[in-house]
């Protein structure tokens, strides 16, 4: 009996490690790599903006985990949740004509920004 328990425990441990590794692969799919693009903002809505890069215009969505870095400070936004704070809308941080460097993930053709660094062009009043 004692000789059977040891191999059974070993099999259980190996199966458990294998199941954990398989679950980890589902959490981080291969297509969730971080990409970057630099371009000029052409349009802005409440939950996305469009960026004209050298090769094409891209729609980039934002979510509550997106970090927007623009003058004068860094803003963690919750725009998808539609915060009642009127100062937290995307259009207050990103304007048409601004240059932006965007780190994003692509999932099923949807580009979602992780971090947006905005260089604001000088505006005349």
Image (cartoon, grey):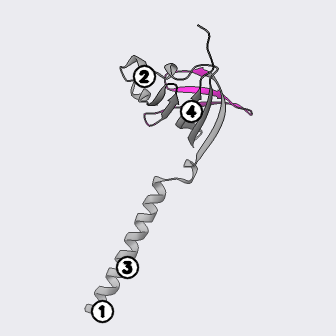
Looking at the image, tell me whether mark 1 or mark 3 is earlier in sequence order: 1
Mark 2, mark 1: which one is toward the viewer?
A: 2
- Asked whether the beta carbons under mark 1 and mark 4 sit within 8 Å of each other, the answer is no
Residue situated furthest top in the rendering: 125
Nearer the observer: mark 2 or 3; the answer is: 2
Tell me the crowding category of disc 2: few under 14, some 14 to 19, or many 20 or more residues within 10 angstroms, Cα based: some
**Residue located at (49% from left, 53% from top):** 28
User: For the residue labelled by badge 1, is the local secondary structure a helix, a strand or a loop?
Assistant: helix
Q: Give the left or right position of residue 38, taking residue 73 as reference.
A: right
| Residue 38 x %, y % | 66, 34
Classify mark 3: helix, strand or loop. Answer: helix
The answer to whether marks 4 and 2 mark residues whose Cβ atoms lie closer than 8 Å is: no
Q: Which residue is disc 1 drawn over? A: 3
Q: Quadrant of the C terminus?
A: top right
Pointer 2 and pointer 1: residues touching (CB < 8 Å)? no
Q: Position of residue 96 (x, y in %)?
A: 61, 19
Q: CA distance from mark 1 to mark 3?
A: 13 Å
Q: CA distance from mark 4 to mark 2?
A: 16 Å
In this view, 42 is above or below 19: above
Considering only order in the chain, which callout, 3 or 2, is on the residue closer to the N terminus?
3
The residue that appears at 30% across and 89% down in the rendered structure is 4
Q: Which residue is mark 4?
A: 117
Asked whether disc 3 touches disc 4, contact meaning CB atoms under 8 Å apart, the reply is no
Residue 79 pos. (x, y %):
43, 27
State the CA–CA distance, disc 2 to disc 1. Answer: 66 Å
Secondary structure, mark 2, is: helix
Q: Earlier in the sequence, mark 1 or mark 4?
A: 1
Horizontal and vertical percent position of residue 66: 48, 35
Residue at which label 2 appears = 88
């Amino acid at each position: 009996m004692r000789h059977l328990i040891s191999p059974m425990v070993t099999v259980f441990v190996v199966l458990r490690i294998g199941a954990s590794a398989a679950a980890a692969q589902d959490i981080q799919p291969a297509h969730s790599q971080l990409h970057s693009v630099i371009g000029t903002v052409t349009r802005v809505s409440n939950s996305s903006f469009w960026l004209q890069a050298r090769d094409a215009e891209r729609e980039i969505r934002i979510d509550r985990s997106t970090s927007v870095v623009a003058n004068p400070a860094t803003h963690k936004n919750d725009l998808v949740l539609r915060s009642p704070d009127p100062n937290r809308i995307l259009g207050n941080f990103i304007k048409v004509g601004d240059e932006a460097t965007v780190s994003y993930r692509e999932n099923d053709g949807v580009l979602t920004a992780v971090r947006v660094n905005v260089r604001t062009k000088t505006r005349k009043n």
